[in-house]
Image (cartoon, rainbow, N blue to C red):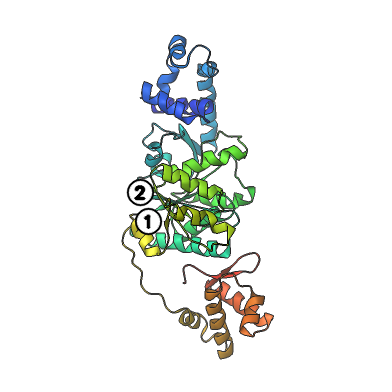
Amino acid sequence: MDKEQETVSALALNHIFGYQPKISKILIERLGSAAAIFERSKDEIDQIFGPYSKKHPDISSAALDKAAEELHDLRSRGCDFIAVTDDAYPSLLKECEDPPVGLYVRSATPPGELFPDGPYISIVGTRDISPYGREWCGRIVYTLSMAPVRPTIVSGFAIGVDINAHLAALDAGLPTIAVLPVGIDDVYPRRHRAIAERLAATPGCALVSDYPPGTSAEAANFLRRNRIIAGMSQGTILVESKMQGGGTMTAGLAASYGREVFALPGRIDDLRSQGCNRLITEKIAEPIHSLGTLQETLGLGRFSRKRKADLAEEVQRRFEGSIDGKQLKQMQEVAMHIRSNRGATPEEIGLALGMSYQEAAFCTGMLESAGIIVTDLLQRCSINAKID
């Protein structure tokens, strides 16, 4: 089989049957390759599709010429296309009943080295992430990064849980795959463009899409994107999701593919946890009770971590000698309060601990600069997953 011709043929098929991937799968299984479809005569095509098929005119040498031009242009811009018949195509995704006939990729890693057989874990959830979700997303990724078998983190690059998972993976040194709902020549959402550049430039990481260049974000694109996330992963973790959220749909797709699904339990009155709680209740997802158990269940090896210093001791170790005794005690009190009151702001911390706003803000600023806590745009504080 001529690999280049097969790649061009698969790319052409993606244009023709991109929204009907099962047709491409059936054709390839029946004829042996993507290229074989374009080698058939008009009469043979008629026998397959019927003489009145609307797709019949699209299976042509012109389609191949257009695909060859697109592939050349892609490679000139640092992108590529991997056909489903290529050994480089993600093996688990290939097992699904409706895999894309090919994947557009943008990565610093050559396509043949990008998708090893090593474990892929998808982490998905709501765009409206809470401090609880942000903290536990970081904890989960950090714990997986310490596993004897280190996984690749897969997500959808969206605002909220997705982008937090990607960033946590990059910070922890784990490879991460971002599956886009737009063409590989674009980024969605646009606010994540700088992160996309960082991700694409990191070895082992990639931006992935099955949409041709020039495809913009449409509502229907997200479900098609979600099936790739679920399909290429041996396990899917739902951090937070509303009852009918996209993350819940991705977890459901993963379950339909026979993959392991886990969900982070949340408060019963929190809309952002209703999807997680429902999947747990319906036995579709296993609840995450222990990060060590999660690591082992996913086949990443036995959980092993040296005991970290007590949080108050860690604060003392970081600041003793650089601030006076009163400030050190306040810093320890603030850190312990944040551990018990995830999402607290400096104003709330000051009121709870009898400090002025200036004192509480000083403490949170110092703790953040030391990497002990993290804050969001609303100044809500949580303990850094790497510390706690």
Q: Residue beneath label 1, please?
A: 150
Q: Quadrant of the N terminus?
A: top left
The reply to whether residue 206 is in sight is no
The reply to whether residue 101 is in sight is yes
Q: Percent from the top left, x then y, of residue 325?
A: 55, 90
State whether residue 96 is above or below residue 243. above
**Quick check: 27 left or right of 268?**
left
Identified at 55% across, 51% down, the residue is 243
Disc 2 from disc 1: Cα separation: 8 Å
Identified at 47% across, 46% down, the residue is 252
66 or 31: nearer the viewer: 31
Q: Percent from the top left, x then y, of residue 220?
A: 59, 37
Furthest toward the front, the residue is 282
Identified at 40% across, 37% down, the residue is 96
171 or 159: nearer the viewer: 159
Q: Percent from the top left, x then y, of residue 313?
A: 46, 82
Q: Residue beneath label 2, please?
A: 118
Furthest toward the bottom, the residue is 325
Label 1 sits on a secondary structure element that is loop
Furthest toward the left, the residue is 302
Q: Answer with the quarter of the image where residue 231 lies.
A: top left
The residue type indicated by label 2 comes to Gly
Label 2 sits on a secondary structure element that is loop
State whether residue 249 is above or below residue 330. above
**Quick check: 93 left or right of 59?**
left
The residue type indicated by label 1 comes to Arg
State whether residue 208 is above or below residue 30. below
99 or 201: nearer the viewer: 99
Identified at 47% across, 16% down, the residue is 49
